[in-house]
Image: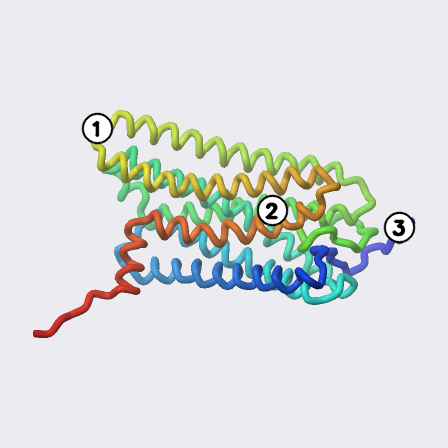
Amino acid sequence: MENYTYNSLTLQLEGLKITKTNKYPIFIFLLLSYMFILIANVGIVILIWTERSLHQPMYLLFCNLSINDVIGNSLLVPRVLADILVPPSDRLIHYYECVMQAFTTQMFSTNAHTVLMIMAFDRYVAICNPLRYSIIMNDKMVMKLTVSASGVAFVLVGILLGLTIRLNRCRTLITNPYCDNASLFKLSCESVFINNVYGLTFTVVLLSSSIGSIILTYFKIAAACLNNKSNSLNSKALKTCSTHLCLYLMMLVSGMILITLHRFPQYAEYRKISAILFNVVPGSLNPVIYGLQSKEIYKSLSNIFHPKRIMLF
């Protein structure tokens, strides 16, 4: 029989079920991944802000994605690392800390979608309306789009968590390595019908808007490239768009795997692992993919690590 504790402010995180033999390898892997995420993403942000040649809408928007990755992982990975080193019975978290963690987790994923949608619009304007690009995508427009992306995500996620915290809680075990919205409302013994309806609507609207805008944007870009006879311009368009599309598909696939595994309780451990990788993998690969594919970023990095030698005669 399950013991019920109503509205307890102390919750227990189930975390990963790991043995003593693989505890430290997993800890070291996550620690190194987190350090790489910090160094790579912060480095990209500093590079873009210090190099005047990179003060373009595409790179400024990518800064938002890097900052989002750093904040999202910084609020999750250190807690997961700490829990790995302690027994399951000591993995305790305060309810309000859990709510904040759930909020930032949901903001992290939602904001990633909205930022990538804006980046797709930027590529559309740059390729389909190159002569008006500097007029349309000026600093004011970039700021508006950035604030709008964060604002929309904040409102949608705020409503999502607001519906969850209104519920009375009769359980204390979070069956996840960290707190998220689904884990929080599963603590309640009340009806979560409204939560499920809004959560499903939220997911459908976000994914349909995201996927729909990407398909429409790339369809128009493909049409513009087919009508354009310039091979150099088409090659540049293909390179920049493939980078953006790679980032989007990586995030979409990892998110869909996590959503799918939530529907199969028998795969709980796989869901926990995928929940952590959903944050770690995109955060690690985003700066690598963009850094290697972007000619301007690669050139700026080359100038830093291989400065031109001045020879004195």
Q: Tell me what residue is drawn at x 32 percent, y 54 percent.
A: 297
Left or right, residue 98 beside residue 46: right
| Rendered residue at 48%/59% (across/down) | 37
Q: Nearer the viewer, mark 3 or mark 2?
A: 3
* Residue 226 lies in quadrant: top left
Question: How is the structure coloured here?
Answer: rainbow
Q: Amino acid at mark 3?
A: Glu
Task: Report how far apart the C-alphas of labels 2 and 1 lie in the structure.
Answer: 45 Å
The residue beneath circle 3 is 2
Q: In the image, residue 47 lies at what x, y percent?
A: 34, 60
Q: Amino acid at mark 1?
A: Lys
Q: Of residues 14 and 155, which is closer to you in this image? A: 14
Crowding near the residue tagged with mark 3, few <14, some 14–19, many ≥20 C-alpha atoms within 10 Å? few
Label 3: which secondary element: loop
Tag 2 or tag 3, which sits nearer the N-term?
A: 3
SS for tag 1? Answer: loop
Q: Which residue is mark 1?
A: 229
